[in-house]
Image: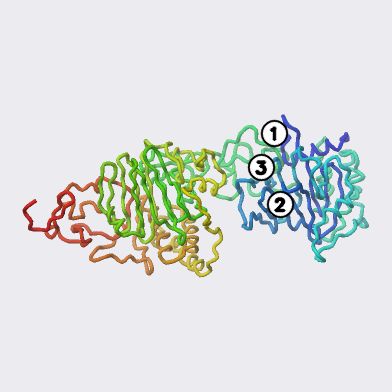
């Protein structure tokens, strides 16, 4: 039975993307569709077909400044390059790569204005601003078909090879008007049907003739695709595929006659013409009921894709592995860390309640929120880190460095500032206590802070300033700022100061600026010397025989190497300090899991201790000061993550001159007063 109208042709074409099966358009009109396939075939929004033989770039479809899609083929008709201008973002498809704003990306890719992801056997780019999607099929390293779905509200406003809905298609005019000037670097040729017609004529006449109203127009389309020097069969098959999708009865005789094969699937996967666009996987075994249908690769019934090992293997859910710290563990594996005991079941860890509190980290320009979200701060400014009832915490980045210069805690209307540039300021907090705040120097590298309601800060002050913030469980869901909202839900972690959940990291971070700043941190490093230094030294973390190797199973190192390389590259001065701080961040993450990395400090990272102090990879001030011999030592009751640095070894005590001495040489303390040994009157 033949189809009766161009509108029906367009509707059937939607089966390619599966939207008609999902119910997505049950309450709205289906989108208009334009497509290019084969070696130069075009299907317009109106449903007519024509052929373009050219190596020139063309406007495929465009509407003012809303969007602009450009395509270019090589001399053999292969789609060489696709450029998509959408919502101010430039996406380029070329050489099997997807490039967004100058950087190659991996799927899925999320942006505030667009989303790119796998969709059955296809790849889909969809706008988050308007109802527009671009689909393409990557076959053996080249794009064999590409199509655009556009909201019907934009009818009558488009330009390009796709034409304009309800405006008669003049193929010669569309080709002429849509060609983009490229000097003498390209060539557009006339259609060529002067070649062997047998295959096209026989296949369409015998097997596909009754599938469309006007089969004759596909004869010329097929011949143009067949008259190529390379990929002749594939280009012919593309035309047959185009016709076959309109057939009301499934008959694969044309495939057997032509040798055109269905798409093949890797590993255990099986091709299906009409199944869910997304697969059940070990990571996501249950899909919502409204998932659209399309051509896709699926696992056999009763199995899910083992997406955690990347080998296209289908397994039963009970055999799914789990991932921890970047390492894959088999089903049933028992994992024990400092904070939890977990068992791998159905692809997920079943864990005991956490014994360790959540912590927010600001390590240079890299932030880890309370709920575990990692991101990069976009600019050097003053930011609200966290805030609650009667308290707020801000940090400041200087103009000439990517590490903190100061931390300010406003507590019950009192302001406490910790500034790395003011030694007298930090000395004040080496031992300080008031009604709502206690501080002390843990080591030469850290100051510990604790409030009356349980807020704790570890402030690294040497060689560079960093912040580690812990809040008590009772404050869950009550805070906001760069550290997130601490509610165990990562989906709303980027809640801005106005209460809107942002998709963009930059928009989220900028909303928490304490003042207006314009000093943006470049995302691409241009300091070649620093870049080389970072790449040469940051890989020290992943050395399988090095000191960090004992921690590899507990803390994934890939992200630490990336942040190390960027921190070193962006470092404005004292690049060795930036390197050692970044390496130390991995060691600190290991220590938080109970894995103490010893002897990693070599060469530029060796710490020189003042006076007769000693460096230790785990240093504690508890009962190691002369003050602790005279008064109660509250440093012993303030527990936080282990830290390294200089201090006094066990059995010696630090006096007020920062010298380690014996018990008998220590002065005495009464309140804030210090009395030399041998003084009797108080």
Asked whether the residues under the numbered discs 3 and 1 touch, taking CB atoms below 8 Å apart as contact, a structural biologist would say: no
Q: Is residue 135 visible?
A: no
The image shows residue 656 at horizontal and vertical percentages of: 20, 58
Residue 1 or residue 187, whichever sits in front: 187
Q: On the image, which quarter does residue 105 sit in?
A: bottom right
Q: Which comes before the other along the chain, label 3 or label 1?
A: 1
**What is the secondary structure assignment of the residue under circle 1?**
loop
Residue at image mark 3: 129
Q: Indicate which label's residue lies in the foreground, 2 or 1.
A: 2
Q: CA distance from mark 2 to mark 1?
A: 24 Å
In this rendering, position of residue 239 left or right of residue 317 = right
Q: Indicate which label's residue lies in the foreground, 3 or 2.
A: 3
Q: On the image, which quarter does residue 82 sit in?
A: bottom right
Asked whether the residues under the numbered discs 3 and 2 touch, taking CB atoms below 8 Å apart as contact, a structural biologist would say: no
Residue at image mark 1: 24
Q: Which comes before the other along the chain, label 3 or label 2?
A: 2
The image shows residue 54 at horizontal and vertical percentages of: 83, 58
- How many residues crowd around disc 2 within 10 Å: few (fewer than 14), some, or many (20 or more)? many
Q: CA distance from mark 3 to mark 1?
A: 17 Å
Q: Is residue 170 above or below residue 444?
A: above
The image shows residue 33 at horizontal and vertical percentages of: 78, 42
Q: On the image, which quarter does residue 26 sit in?
A: top right
Q: Which comes before the other along the chain, label 2 or label 1?
A: 1
Residue 156 or residue 189, whichever sits in front: 156
Q: Is residue 583 visible?
A: yes
- How many residues crowd around disc 1 within 10 Å: few (fewer than 14), some, or many (20 or more)? some
**What is the secondary structure assignment of the residue under circle 3?**
loop
Residue in view at x 65 percent, y 42 percent? 128
Residue 626 or residue 216, whichever sits in front: 626
**What is the secondary structure assignment of the residue under circle 2?**
strand
In this rendering, position of residue 172 left or right of residue 448 = right
Residue at image mark 2: 84
């Amino acid at each position: 039975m033949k189809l009766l109208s161009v509108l029906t042709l367009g509707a059937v074409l939607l089966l390619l993307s599966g939207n008609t099966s999902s119910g997505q358009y049950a309450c709205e009109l289906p989108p208009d569709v334009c497509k290019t396939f084969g070696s130069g075939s075009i299907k317009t929004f109106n449903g007519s077909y024509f052929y373009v033989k050219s190596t020139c770039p063309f406007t495929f479809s465009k509407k003012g400044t809303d969007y602009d899609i450009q395509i270019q083929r090589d001399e053999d008709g292969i789609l060489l390059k696709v450029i998509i201008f959408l919502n101010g973002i430039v996406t380029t498809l070329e050489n099997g790569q997807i490039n967004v704003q100058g950087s190659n990306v991996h799927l899925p890719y999320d942006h505030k204005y667009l989303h790119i992801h796998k969709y059955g056997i296809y790849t889909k780019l969809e706008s988050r601003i308007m109802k527009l999607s671009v689909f393409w099929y990557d076959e053996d390293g080249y794009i064999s078909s590409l199509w655009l779905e556009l909201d019907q509200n934009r009818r009558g406003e488009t330009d390009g090879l796709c034409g304009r809905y309800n405006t008669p298609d003049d193929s010669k005019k569309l080709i002429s008007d849509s060609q983009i000037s490229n000097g003498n670097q390209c060539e557009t040729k006339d259609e060529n049907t002067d070649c062997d017609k047998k295959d096209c004529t026989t296949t369409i006449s015998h097997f596909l003739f009754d599938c469309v109203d006007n089969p004759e127009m596909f004869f010329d389309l097929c011949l143009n695709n067949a008259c190529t020097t390379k990929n002749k069969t594939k280009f012919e098959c593309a035309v047959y595929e185009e016709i076959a999708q309109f057939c009301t009865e499934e008959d694969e005789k044309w495939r057997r006659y032509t040798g055109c094969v269905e798409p093949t699937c890797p590993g255990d996967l099986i091709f299906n013409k009409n199944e869910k666009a997304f697969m059940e996987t070990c990571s996501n075994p249950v899909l919502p009921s409204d998932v659209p249908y399309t051509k896709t690769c699926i696992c056999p019934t009763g199995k899910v894709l083992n997406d955690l090992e990347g080998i296209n293997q289908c397994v039963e859910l009970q055999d799914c592995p789990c991932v921890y710290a970047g390492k894959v563990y088999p089903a049933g594996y028992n994992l024990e860390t400092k904070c939890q005991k977990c068992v791998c079941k159905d692809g997920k860890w079943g864990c005991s309640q956490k014994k360790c509190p959540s912590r927010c980290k600001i390590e240079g320009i890299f932030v880890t929120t309370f709920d575990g979200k990692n991101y990069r701060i976009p600019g050097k400014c003053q930011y609200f880190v966290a805030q609650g009832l009667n308290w707020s915490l801000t940090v400041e980045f200087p103009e000439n460095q990517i590490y903190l210069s100061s931390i300010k805690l406003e507590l019950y209307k009192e302001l406490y500032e910790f500034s790395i540039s003011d030694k007298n300021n930090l000395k004040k907090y080496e031992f300080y206590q008031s009604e709502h705040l206690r501080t002390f120097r843990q080591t030469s590298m850290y100051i510990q802070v604790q409030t009356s309601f349980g807020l704790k800060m570890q402030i690294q002050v040497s060689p560079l300033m960093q912040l580690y913030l812990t809040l008590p469980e009772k404050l869950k869901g009550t805070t906001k700022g760069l550290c997130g909202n601490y509610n165990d839900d990562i989906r709303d972690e980027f809640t801005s100061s106005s209460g809107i959940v942002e998709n963009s990291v930059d928009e989220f971070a900028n909303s928490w600026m304490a003042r207006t700043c314009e000093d943006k941190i470049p995302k691409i490093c241009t300091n070649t010397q620093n870049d080389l230094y970072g790449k040469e030294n940051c890989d020290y973390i992943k050395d399988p025989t090095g000191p960090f190797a004992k921690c590899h199973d507990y803390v994934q190192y890939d992200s630490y190497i990336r942040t190390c390389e960027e921190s070193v590259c962006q470092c404005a001065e004292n690049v060795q300090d930036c390197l050692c701080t970044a390496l130390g961040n991995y060691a600190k993450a290991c220590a938080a899991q109970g894995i103490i990395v010893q002897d990693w400090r070599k060469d530029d990272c060796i710490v020189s201790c003042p006076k007769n102090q000693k460096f230790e990879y785990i240093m504690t001030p508890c009962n190691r000061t002369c003050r602790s011999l005279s008064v109660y030592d509250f440093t012993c009751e303030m527990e936080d993550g282990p830290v390294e640095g200089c201090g006094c070894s066990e059995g010696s005590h630090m006096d007020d001159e920062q010298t380690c001495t014996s018990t008998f040489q220590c002065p005495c303390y009464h309140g804030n007063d210090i009395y030399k040994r041998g003084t009797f009157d108080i």
